[in-house]
Image (cartoon, rainbow, N blue to C red):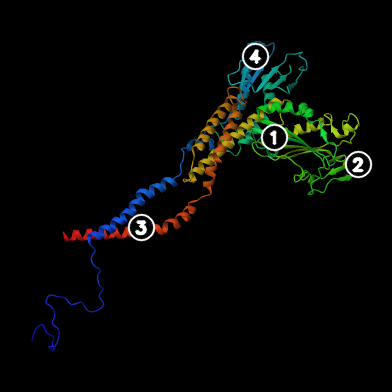
Amino acid sequence: MDPTSTEDGGGVSAVEGTELPASGNAKATPPTESARTLLTRRTIVFSFWAIVLGLGLPHWLWTTSTYRASLPLSTMNDWAEGKACDLRFAFPIRVRVPGWTREEMVELSGSLSALLDHDGSDGLLDFTIHVGNADEEPILPAHGDPALTVVLHAAGSPDTNGVTSRLEPGESALHLGSGLRQAGEIADQIREITSPQQEALAYLLSGTPFAVTEHGVLRATQNTWSEASLDARNTRAFKPSTTYHLSFSLFVPGNEPSAWAIEDALAAYMTPLLDALAGVSNFTVTTQVQLHASFSPSIAGPTFDEASGKWKLRKEDLSGFVNAAEWPLSPSIGEGSTINFVLYVPAPGHSPLVVADTGGTGWLVPQWGGVAILNLDEPTTPRKSTTDTDRTTLSAANLDEIMLTFADQLTALIGLPSSPAGSLALRIAALQRERATALLLSTASTLGALSRLVHKLPNIPIPDTVATSVGTSLRHLDHACQDLRAGRYSNTDTNLGALGNAQAASEASEKAFFEPSMVGQVYFPDEHKVAVYVPLLGPMGVPLVLAGVKELLGWYRGMREKVKRT
């Protein structure tokens, strides 16, 4: 049989050397790519990735990167944790004893120092005694004026015989009579003056990191302060500020009085007080008169008490007495707080008007201002005459008691201590120490909060202005701490003093913490970025990634085959 024919002899012969297609469902293999085609495709994929990695990614990193200025975080944390400053308050005392020899005064100084140093080991005030010759001023250290001057008068001096002591209202001076000559008695008088100050300072430091120091400064005072009274004083007082705006307003329900001699009254009563407080804050004064001022609809109004013949306001109505919706009172806008003082002159049909529980005519509104009522129809109200002019104008004599009330309310609203009662100068000095301490504590807390914020949000931008403000705040904090320890409390020509530096540090820290460019980033978490980038980069990135992976795998297989063939 012919080997090229089929078995039945009638088939078609096949060409020698040619394979027949395999029977069944076998897949047809794609034609092999030429080297030129493969190179072209890989060049295109490589070009896309080169543009993405070489141009797109650096440009994206450059345009989306956040600049973070360097901050002294460790120093900021040290202040927040109370490690950067051991708070102590220098209290230099000048002693004058006319008629004594220098040896006697030095001996008295040594005894006083020993007694007061025993108190200072557990207290917050560091007492130092300075004496001079009998008839000359004691030589004080370079840090400034004494916190207290003690003058011992010889027997026979006017108003100083016997066991007496008195304070000068306008000076930081304690005058002691001839009956108080022993060091122990003098030390007791000094303790009586300084004890409320130590209690107030200990109250401010309690609950803060500065309360625990290596000297145990609060051990003697933690159980002695009147916490309730200090709480009440801090609750009604405004936040410490470099500027306060005082607004004096006259409100009447009718059309008279329509004028008041407020300038004369302010010059007589408020200006001396504001001048004395100039070392604590700056004050601006505005006045206004509002006619036809009605009561607030939220209160029931006064009721007539037949027994006393007076109109009375309930205690519950005092908080809503001021008709804030209709009375044009100055709000706290801009730098500094506004303290409102309202004088209300009731209509003749509602006069005399008093507070029901106390019978008084004035009250304080915490962290807002004060209110006083002037009853013109009372016999005790000073009136020069009953002319028409006097009925339409309040004279300075009419405002005497009102201005005294407003002055007392002002001292309470700015947090002026009530003791020692005999010396306004000592009370203002105590307020300076308290203000400086409160601002220092607040600034340290703000810097600690900023440090924690920067650590928690690594992507938040930190502009150079924040670093500058933080540096300024830390520098003034260091100066404030040094000034407190040296007894430099007031502002001078060459030094801001403890209070001035503490105010500058507080302003700089607030400026750094509330930087506008940082505040916006606090509320922009990473989830927002994912929501923005995924819809944008997903459709473009997936094809590039898959093409790149495919080419890498193809290149890897090709390399393996070459290795096997070799």
Regarding mark 1 in the picture, which secondary structure is present there? strand
Tag 3 or tag 4, which sits nearer the N-term?
A: 4
Q: What amino acid is at disc 3?
A: Leu
Q: CA distance from mark 3 to mark 1?
A: 66 Å
Q: Which residue occupies the foreground of this view, 282 or 131? A: 282
- Kindly tell me whether residue 414 is visible in this rendering: no
Residue that badge 2 annotates: 309
Q: What amino acid is at disc 4?
A: Glu
Regarding mark 4 in the picture, which secondary structure is present there? loop
Q: CA distance from mark 1 to mark 4?
A: 40 Å
Residue 356 in the figure: left or right of residue 193: right
Counting from the top left corner in percent of width and height, residue 468 is at 51, 34
Tag 1 or tag 3, which sits nearer the N-term?
A: 1
Tag 4 or tag 2, which sits nearer the N-term?
A: 4
Residue drawn where x is 69% and y is 17% of the image? 151
Residue that badge 3 annotates: 544
Q: What amino acid is at disc 1?
A: His
As drawn, 80 above or below 49 = above
